[in-house]
């Protein structure tokens, strides 16, 4: 009886308050989770907008390309310029190798090979499993919706993106845009056999959006530029 009373007292004065305290913290967390997510989002945005200088850790192999235009042939058609693979300096991880721009929406950014945080703070990053311009495959590039890719909120079908590399200038016309969940692998197919520039960023663009679980994808088809062979 004495032991039973002690156990009941122990439960009454220690275990029960502890259980109720834990339950209270859980309920408070659930109630304030949306606010916490918004706070995290704002903090991330502020840190991204400040764009710390990481250029000392990253290299650049980009050289402003020479005039790539050619005279029309007698048929009036512009020949497709070809560039040998041996003439291209292939970018390594973390190297700035190209520039991307879209005049209508005011977008301009350096393109780095790779897409980790140190890269997307100073430019936009290319997924390692995708290909360089001119190769005839997908070029998959991501960037922050609060900095370099913020202008994508105004993109429209028909907009033209210009990608400058050291071996040539490429143009891509936007054919469509689509929103996917962040983990949806149906957003692109790296095995497709035609060249397409695909840009992606967090979505929605609104500041107080909490945790962004979606991605905006912009699909642009190649309309000009040298062919690698």
Image (spheres, helix red, strand yellow):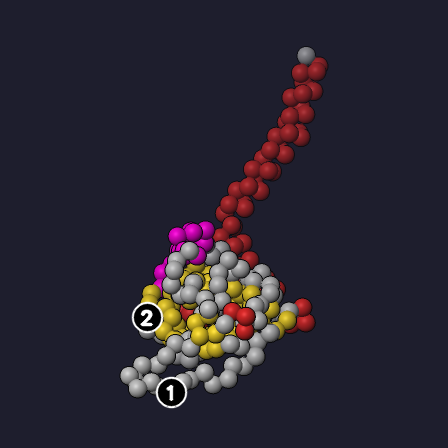
Looking at the rendered image, the quarter that the N terminus falls into is top right
* 10 vs 168, nearest the viewer: 168
Cα distance in 3D space between marks 2 and 1: 29 Å
Looking at the rendered image, the disc whose residue lies closer to the viewer, 2 or 1, is 1
- Residue 109 appears in the picture as rendered: no
Give the residue at mark 2: 157
Q: Which residue lies furthest to the top in this view?
A: 1
Q: Which image quadrant for residue 115?
A: bottom right
Residue 138 placement, left or right of 36: left
- Residue shown at the point (67%, 68%) measured from the top left: 57
Q: Which image quadrant for residue 26?
A: top right
The magenta region covers 177-190
- Residue shown at the point (51%, 45%) measured from the top left: 30
Q: Which mark is residue 179?
A: none
Asked if 74 appears above or below 133 in the picture, the reply is below
Residue 62 lies within the magenta run = no
Which element carries disc 2, helix, strand or loop?
loop
Please tell me how crowded label 1 is: few (under 14), some (14-19), or many (20+) other residues with Cα within 10 Å.
few
Question: Sequence order check: which comes first, mark 2 or mark 1?
Answer: 1
Give the residue at mark 1: 71
* 121 vs 139, nearest the viewer: 139
- Residue shown at the point (53%, 65%) measured from the top left: 125
Residue 189 lies within the magenta run = yes
Asked if 12 appears above or below 28 in the picture, the reply is above
Residue 210 placement, left or right of 93: left
Marks 2 and 1 close (CB-CB < 8 Å) = no
**Residue 153: x and y, percent?**
40, 69
- Residue shown at the point (57%, 79%) measured from the top left: 63
**Residue 92: x and y, percent?**
60, 65
* 117 vs 172, nearest the viewer: 172
Please tell me how crowded label 2 is: few (under 14), some (14-19), or many (20+) other residues with Cα within 10 Å.
few
Q: How many labels does the image show?
A: 2
């Amino acid at each position: 009886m004495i032991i039973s009373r002690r156990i009941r007292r122990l439960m009454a004065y220690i275990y029960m308050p502890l259980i109720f305290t834990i339950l209270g913290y859980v309920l408070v967390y659930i109630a304030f989770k949306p606010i916490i997510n918004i706070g995290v989002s704002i903090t991330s945005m502020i840190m991204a907008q400040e764009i710390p200088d990481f250029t000392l850790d990253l290299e650049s192999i980009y050289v402003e390309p020479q005039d790539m235009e050619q005279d029309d042939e007698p048929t009036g058609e512009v020949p497709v310029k070809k560039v040998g693979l041996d003439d291209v300096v292939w970018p390594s991880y973390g190297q700035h190798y190209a520039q991307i721009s879209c005049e209508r929406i005011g977008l301009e950014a350096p393109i780095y090979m790779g897409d980790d945080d140190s890269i997307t703070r100073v430019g936009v990053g290319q997924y390692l499993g995708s290909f360089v311009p001119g190769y005839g495959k997908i070029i998959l590039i991501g960037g922050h919706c609060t900095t370099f890719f913020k202008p994508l909120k105004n993109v429209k079908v028909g907009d033209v993106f210009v990608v400058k590399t050291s071996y040539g200038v490429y143009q891509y016309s936007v054919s469509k845009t689509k929103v996917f969940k962040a983990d949806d692998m149906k957003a692109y197919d790296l095995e497709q056999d035609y060249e397409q520039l695909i840009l992606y960023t967090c979505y929605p663009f609104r500041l107080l959006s909490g945790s962004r679980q979606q991605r905006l994808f912009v699909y642009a088809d190649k309309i000009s530029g040298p062919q690698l062979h």
